[in-house]
Image (cartoon, rainbow, N blue to C red):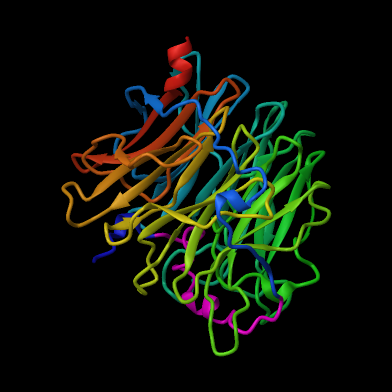
Amino acid sequence: MKWNERSQPRAGGLALVVGVAGLLALAGCDQSPTETKRTNAECPGLERPSRGQGPAVWGAAEQVPLPAGWQIDRPRIAVGGGRILLAFHTLDGDISTPGDVFLVTRAGGRWSSPENVSQAAERAGEPRLGVDARGEPHLVWGERFGAPHPSGRWVPDAILHRTRGPLGWLPADTLYRSPFLPYASVPWDPVRDRSGRLHVLVDVEPEARRTPELFHWVWEAGRWLPGHSILGSAPAFMGGGRGGGNADLTVARDGRLLAVFTSGAPAQPGQRDISSVFFTSSADGGASWTAPQLISRSGLLPAYTPRIAEAGDGRIHAVWVRDTIGDMLPDVLEHSYSPDGECWTKPVRVYPPGSGLLQVPALTPDGAGGLHLVFNFFSERLDPPYYLRYSYWDGERWSPPEPLFRMSTITGSYVGLTRDEGGTLHLAVTAQEGGIDRLYYTTAVPSGRRARE
């Protein structure tokens, strides 16, 4: 199977860019995580099935107006202040080389002109997007300040952040710059807690030749507070070239921070473990975190890009993609859930292996026990080879993934998906039609809600 260059994960995406070698180096860790293998009936709180609001009813996709000839990728989407916000990076000639990070907004039914947020001296890419309590955007992205990466590809070594103040855009600030490694993994989208603070999880190498640790940063009162390891007592347990996007964070209804991440898990003597899926949480805003809970052990078949969501019924869900054939490329999509973050159900496969190549999934809950899942799917056996797939968790099972839009080519590995306070879904995706890159936006409402309306 060929890996199409248009969809190759670049720096800050899947861990493949910055090396499987780092993952393999994790074998031999001696910090044992907690592990449970239970059926639904054995997890207290899962005895009775839940119910969702019904699968989404999608509207027609509209093209977001952009200057002619632009090549774009990595769409991210957020809702705030009565506006739709879309971030993306342009491509600078080469399909794997970003140019700058841009933002467009939609208010009153009209799209704004693109704003160059990064204004990088060289290149900027891998945007992430959050919104503060004022509805103002917070963009996080990667840049490279040091010597070219040994691979010859564009790989960021610094993470920057920028937001707007009362008088306009504030100067960009550096969230993190790697002092030892030739790369910095861009974190996933910032999330806002009930007090209005923003949170991100970032891979950090605190000392030379040490395995990277997962650090937690908080934006409060107009600045980033000093980051710290979420597992300070067990630093060797973390890291290993997981890459940005391989840790995800959400805020529960009770205010807790919930996180999933991938890391090499301690294994039995003579065994190796590359990149398993773990859960941790914080009840004090990130000052302390629970011991890592092992959701799924990988062995030599790594997991990538886990996503986490709390459904409207309070159950915690995690999805991720994983390799099942040993080529380090994700070909299966899996799901597990928990009533409390401690007892996790045995993972089930949302999409079976052997069908093609799975891309970075996007997950968001409905207002009840349901989940909406969108992911990009690639197979050389299909024409066109790319399809955007949608599946719905109704509280008991996943619907068969179906093509969401039959565009000529869905490009890039990322999909922007969010849900506003009224329950409407907002989706952004890049597609190529007639050799021209286009950015599309659409909305959806759960079928159960539409029926009531």
Q: Is residue 422 visible?
A: yes
- Would you say 290 lies left or right of 419 here? right
The answer to whether residue 94 of the structure is visible from this angle is no
Q: Nearer the viewer, residue 7 or 341?
A: 341
Principal secondary structure, stretch drawn in magenta: loop
Q: Is residue 10 magenta?
A: yes
Looking at the image, residue 150 lies above or below residue 282? below
Check if residue 290 falls in the magenta segment.
no
Spot the residue most to the bottom.
270
Q: Quadrant of the N terminus?
A: bottom left
Percent from the top left, x then y, of residue 409? Answer: 24, 44
Image height of 26 relative to 9, above or below: below
- Residue at image position (40%, 66%) is 323
Residue 134 percent across, percent down from the top left: 71, 26
Q: Give whichever of 136, 371 is nearer the camera.
A: 371
Query: Which residue is more in the foreground, 233 or 16?
Result: 233
**423 left or right, relative to 197:** left
x then y, percent, for residue 17: 45, 68
Write down the region rendered in magenta.
9-31
Residue that lies at the very extreme toward the top in this rendered image: 453
Q: Residue at x 18, y 50 (%)?
A: 382
Residue at (66% x, 82% y) in the render = 209
- Residue 82 lies left or right of residue 58; in this view the side is right
